[in-house]
Amino acid sequence: MYFHNIPGIPSSLPILKPGDPIPEPGPWSKHIERLPWSIAKEGDLVKSMFVKFMMGQDKKREPVARPTMGLQPERWNEDLRSSIQNVEAVFIQMVGHEASVRCDHCLAGRRIFALCVVVDEPGIPKCCGNFMYGRKGAKCTILQHGQIQPVSVPNAGVYGGVPATGLQTSSASSVRLRADITACLDSVLVQLQQLSTLQQRQAIAVVELESAAESASSALQAVQSRIGKSLPVRYTDVVGVRNFIQAAARTKGSALAISKDS
């Protein structure tokens, strides 16, 4: 499909060639911050906790593409509109830190972005934005090699040395990690309470909404149980909670749409 100019989309795509300076935040950063895609935002509700967190961080650069991609602005906007993971990936590119050693994926020149960028914060997937774009990022070598960012990065190294199967930290780091994850899950509980309030107001799609909220609650309880028993909390468990929350949010959106049509 060929796209002509669409209002609100920057007319050109930022390309980074060898030797070029990295551009400051510009038109694409402003466009992306608006979250003009229903998959990422519905009204005032940001559907990804990771995106919501990164929206509060300072923007460091425009997301820059490889010159070999040949991607058109309208096509890229469609890619972002199609996947919340793509939106998360582009935010990582805007707010994260360049990896001190690029992952194998970026070294091989794969996918869209010219830079290997990570956000080294508890609760954020431990993969570069380039690898997350279009996939889950579970096998990025940033995660496999446990790369630790420079000391200037807040909370750097909390996830350092983490194998793909779980989180193994020192005793002090483990306590801090559990506190960070608990704070993240507290935010999830607030979202669940909002969904519960909504289902009391909605007469349409109540069964589907209850089912989605129940799935999110079950996943949340499983993670909280591991925290309470001082057991390792796997990255995949936390992502699972997020996925259930997003599914519940999508169900909520469907309920609202049906209600408006009725």
Image (tube, grey):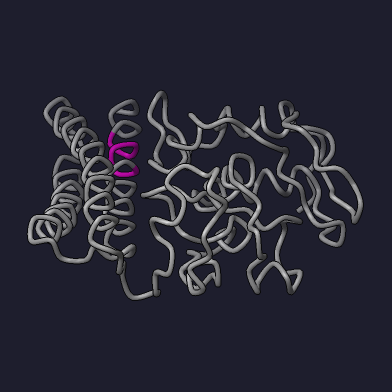
The count of marks equals 0
The x and y percentages for residue 230 are 13, 61
- Left or right of 102: which side holds 179? left
Of 22 and 67, nearer the camera is 22
Residue 90's place in the image compared with 30, above or below, is below
> Residue 92 in magenta?
no
The x and y percentages for residue 262 are 28, 28
Residue at image coords 78%, 32%: 10
Which region shows up in magenta? 250-255
Residue at image coords 71%, 38%: 61
Residue 256's place in the image compared with 74, above or below, is above
The x and y percentages for residue 30 are 66, 27
What predominant SS class does the magenta segment belong to? helix
Of 142 and 261, nearer the camera is 142
- Left or right of 17: which side holds 107? left
> Residue 251 in magenta?
yes
Q: Quadrant of residue 24?
A: top right
